[in-house]
Amino acid sequence: MNVEEQVRGALESVALATQPEERGAYQRFLRRRARRGRIQAAVVAVLLLGLLAGAVVLPGQLRRPPVMAGATGSPTVDVTAFQWGWRFAYAGARVHANGGVGRTPELVVPAGQPVHVRLHSDDVVHSFSVPSLRFERQALPGRVTEFDLTVAEVGTYPGRCGTYCGLAHTEMPFLIRAMPREAFSRWLQATANAAVGPITLQGRLLTGRSWSSATVRGRLLVVAVTASWCGPCRSDQGTLNHVADAYQAKGVRFLAVATQDTRPHARAFARTSRITYPVLLDPSGTIAQRLQVTAIPVTFVLDHDGRIAVRLEGQSAQRTLSARLDALLSGKAAKQPP
């Protein structure tokens, strides 16, 4: 359309609007157009306000820490990653599941109910990853990452470390097993009851003769899980020797468990470290696995009934172990944390 046609159209509109019979219709048309314009402007304004609110509120929601569980009675589990495995500990229940190279631990949860997880790392950055649940959180050394995990359906879900953490990174699988809530409650109670029961350690000593912890039932038994290939174990042995010298005279018995070790290496370690108490061989790691050991050194104290009363992980200080033994000998062990 050229300029002449545009001018002619405008003049015709003016002429039409000035005719008495068409003036009312033309005014109504203008009012409808203005009203439609106002509605469109209002819709655009609402959309812009919605987008602005989303831009301001949504990042805050994403950064908001997960709601803490506990008030609803949900279980709390401490999940610890280490090179190379996982340790699951149910708060307040003395229930543990441990894994390492060649052992896949299982995290049992109630289906459809949130489980509060406190995620730890003993050494480097790991990742708690469950691909089938599209879920992943990083485990950072020196920091606790807390979140709620809900598995909606009953079933078994494989997990792994999703962040490269060293040579055996691929040897860190775990399983999440979701069961009905009532079944989970029964499982947790039964497992907790079994965990506090007496245990019997048995096998062959370095001397070749059979040995069982049942022979020292009625006395306190300190069990040090160690190995010749473990540097911290060698440096910690002097402390254990001092404690053994002081407490064997009080009736406390001591035992070293040489786990995943050969007889010649264990014998050389016992000789150079001057271990004066029995050394039980555990070449396959079966005893360590039964004690839910994932890293050594670790020291246990079995009470007079053969139940685990004390567990000290890492290089145990002489003062700490001595204080626990004094409490058990005096009958004040109930006041001591396990």
Image (spheres, grey):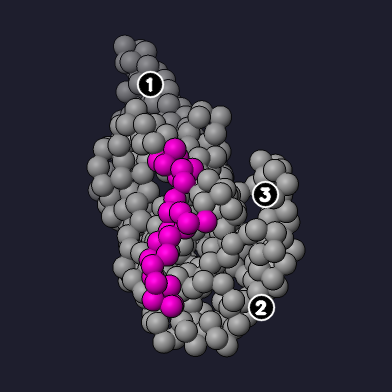
Q: Distance between the residues labelled 3 and 2?
A: 23 Å
Task: Report the side of 177 relative to 317 (left or right).
Answer: left
Q: What crowding class fits label 3: few (fewer than 14 Cα within 10 Å), some (14-19), or many (20 or more)?
A: many
Task: Report the side of 6 relative to 280 (left or right).
Answer: left
What residue is pinned by disc 1? 32
Give yes or no for residue 122 being in the magenta stretch.
no
Q: How far apart are marks 1 and 3 (CA)?
A: 91 Å
Decide which of tag 1 and tag 3 comes sooner along the chain: 1
Q: Is residue 138 above or below residue 266?
A: above
What residue is pinned by disc 2? 238
**Tag nearer the camera, 1 or 3:** 3
- Residue at the image point whose x is 43% and y is 78% from the top: 207
User: Are the two marked residues, 2 and 1, in contact with CB atoms closer than 8 angstroms?
Assistant: no
- Residue at the image point whose x is 32% and y is 23% from the top: 16
Which quarter of the figure has residue 162? Answer: bottom left
In percent of width and height, residue 37 lies at: 42, 30
Decide which of tag 3 and tag 2 comes sooner along the chain: 2
Amino acid tagged 3: Leu
Amino acid tagged 1: Arg
Between 110 and 289, which is closer to the camera in this rendering? 289
| Badge number at residue 328 | 3
- Kind of element beneath mark 2: helix
Amino acid tagged 2: Gly
Between 234 and 167, which is closer to the camera in this rendering? 234
Which quarter of the figure has residue 203? Answer: bottom left
Which quarter of the figure has residue 21? Answer: top left
In percent of width and height, residue 115 lies at: 45, 40
Decide which of tag 2 and tag 1 comes sooner along the chain: 1
User: Are the two marked residues, 1 and 3, in contact with CB atoms closer than 8 angstroms?
Assistant: no
Q: Give the range drawn in magenta.
A: 191-216
